[in-house]
Image (spheres, rainbow, N blue to C red):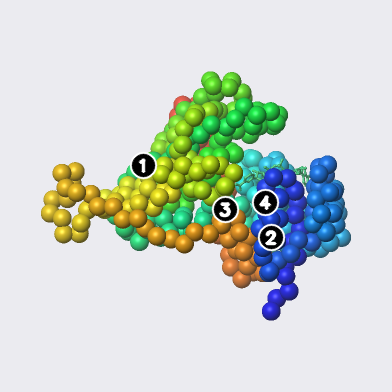
Amino acid sequence: MNSPLRIALIGAGNMGQQHYRHLQTLSEATLCAVADPGPQAVGLAAEWGVRHFVDHRQMLELVRPDAVIVANPNNQHVSTALDCLAAGVPVLLEKPVGVHLDEVRELVAAVKRSGVPVLVGHHRRHNPLIVRAHELVQSGALGRLITVTALFQLRKPDSYFEIPWRREPGAGMLLTNLIHDLDLLRHLCGEVRSVQAITDNSVRGFANEDSAAVLLQFEGGTLGTLNGSDAVAAPWSWELDSGENPVYPRQADQPCYLLAGTAGALSIPQLKRWHYAADQVDAGWHKPLLMVEESYSGDDALCLQLQHFVRVARREVEPLVSAADAARTLALVEAIREAAATGRACTPALIEA
Ligand SMILES: NC(=O)c1ccc[n+]([C@@H]2O[C@H](COP(=O)([O-])OP(=O)(O)OC[C@H]3O[C@@H](n4cnc5c(N)ncnc54)[C@H](O)[C@@H]3O)[C@@H](O)[C@H]2O)c1
């Protein structure tokens, strides 16, 4: 029997504390240190019974953890992960993997060079609901996937924007929120060949977009739209519909992703699958469309991600979302930004594994 994996936490804010709560439920891992220069971190480390460090490099040197969770601000992700790789320590790195593709390429190269694994925190992929949806698409139950419609339609309260970085260039809905939807679209529908996009900031007038309309053409031929706004009083988003995070009152009846293929269609998160009877003659819009609710066994995606990370750190499995994989999602975000700025169709940059 392995002794518990000693995991250090770098960044003990909102997300770091969520990781800590899940870590507490696992027998196969234990928290060994906290590195965070913020004012609340000393007290948290004391409450959690571990050593506190202001500087993660000092923590790596003195504590020598078996693995780390990095949940500090986005613009520090790559440099922090590089320090961990240099110390030979596997990383669960919160999303986004970085803020610019150039720095992320450096990280991808360092992972390859060092052989030390990095798992990126696109946790929705660990959600059993998404695992089932992926299986259904892969099984051919929908036939050839022709269209996908994705919605991120909700309202963030004005107080959300009182924190200065959330109003500044580089933050914003695309990198903070739509990156999750785009990662799932890649996961479910394949790589994206080309995007077109329009963004708008006319509701709040900040540097970042309030709304975005994105057209996607996937390599397999699927066509998609992602319609996003964080300034609308609406119920259509993974956040509100999936029930994954209880801080958002749930709109369980509302879909956020609609996948349609030649043989069937699927709504997410309801997992309602629509199809014609196998013996239906001349199947089409005059004939009854049948619906089945696909079953799956629900579980907490963040907890499953952490269990997976323990196995990644022990080199038992490859990361479900590697740095190179997450870099492709970031490349997609960058292509959307470029498409919105230029009015042209853009192709996401190629990322070698
Ligand atoms: N997976 C998800 O769904 C999800 C949700 C929310 C946030 N996140 C990600 O988690 C990360 C943190 O977001 P948050 O909402 O917890 O932010 P936060 O502001 O609540 O926490 C960030 C923490 O990092 C600390 N910090 C700052 N500089 C540091 C440094 N040099 N070393 C160590 N710690 C440092 C801050 O003191 C703070 O405690 C972000 O990358 C964000 O994108 C992911």
How far is disc 1 from disc 2 in space, using C-alphas? 40 Å
Query: What kind of element bears circle 4?
Result: helix
Q: Residue at x 53, y 28 (%)?
A: 231
Q: Which residue is mark 4?
A: 18
Q: How packed is label 2: few (under 14 Cα within 10 Å), some, or many (20 or more)?
A: some
Foreground: disc 1 or disc 3: 3
- Among numbered discs 1 and 4, the one appearing first in the sequence: 4
How far is disc 4 from disc 2 in space, using C-alphas? 9 Å
- Asked if 216 appears above or below 191 in the picture, the reply is above
The reply to whether dot 1 and dot 4 touch (C-beta < 8 Å) is no
Tell me which corner region of the image, top left, top right, bottom left or bottom right, holds residue 160: top right
Q: Is residue 149 left or right of residue 78?
A: left
Query: What kind of element bears circle 3?
Result: helix
Q: Is residue 33 left or right of residue 97?
A: right
Mark count: 4
How far is disc 3 from disc 2 in space, using C-alphas? 15 Å
Establish whether ligand 1 lies closer than 8 Å to the Cβ of label 4: yes
How far is disc 4 from disc 3 in space, using C-alphas? 12 Å
Q: How packed is label 3: few (under 14 Cα within 10 Å), some, or many (20 or more)?
A: many
Q: Which residue is mark 1?
A: 223
Q: Position of residue 258 (x, y in %)?
A: 37, 44
Q: Position of residue 67 (x, y in %)?
A: 72, 62
Foreground: disc 1 or disc 4: 4
